[in-house]
Amino acid sequence: MHDTSPAAMISRVTMICLTAAMALSACSDEPDPLPDEARLPDAAVAALQVHLAAMSDGDLTCSHAAIEAAPRAVGFINDDRLPDFAISTQDLQCRSEIGSAVAYFCGGSICAFPALMSDGADYQVIWLMSGNEVSTRTDYQEARFVVRQGVFAGSAGSRVAVREYVWRDGTLTRVLEREEVAGRSP
């Protein structure tokens, strides 16, 4: 039989409240707030500089200031609780001795976006699919990079291809590709 005295009721309510509080605190194991987007970690800048020099056989040079000045998306994409970045290369002001520096990243209407993925104290560079815009968002507590690309379809109208990438099993993986109807301005 259950004890219905006021003291027993208070004890049960207290126990339920404590259990709920512990459950909620276990769910709130959030990473630290995102850093100020105006500053990239030195290790991220160095990783991108080394990668760009290697991919261009030493032709492409991007100063620390140029990389810092480029727009970027930032989020906790992998599971190490350190920020990860994707650089908007169409605004990256690098130097090339043999041609246009932008040609290393961009084609006629789209650009490739390097993701700078934290790996402890270092960063690795992983290229995302090309597009016109990169951002981050979170679905079901899973952070992701989102790449949008305008697609002109002639008389059928324009569309926007959207590709989303998440970190799974130690690699950046495309998990979604969809199309949106492009908005038209009057």
Image: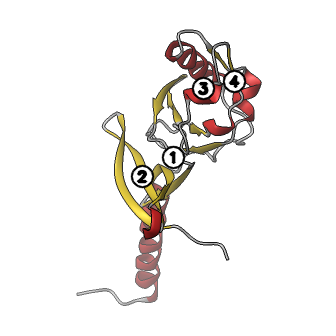
Q: How far is the residue under mark 1 from the one under mark 4?
A: 19 Å
Mark positioned earlier in the residue sequence (2 or 3):
3
The residue carrying mark 4 is 94
The residue carrying mark 3 is 44
Q: Nearer the viewer, residue 108 or 71?
A: 108
At 36% across and 46% down in the image, what residue appears? 174
The residue carrying mark 2 is 163
Q: Is residue 96 left or right of residue 120?
A: right
Q: How far is the residue under mark 1 from the one under mark 2?
A: 9 Å
User: Quick check: marks 1 and 2 in contact, CB under 8 Å?
Assistant: yes
Q: How far is the residue under mark 4 from the one under mark 2?
A: 27 Å
Q: Nearer the viewer, residue 77 or 132?
A: 132
Point out the frontmost of discs 2 and 3: 2
Q: Position of residue 108 (x, y in %)?
A: 55, 41
**Disc 1, SS:** loop
Which amino acid does the dot numbered 4 rest on?
Answer: Cys
Which amino acid does the dot numbered 1 rest on?
Answer: Gly
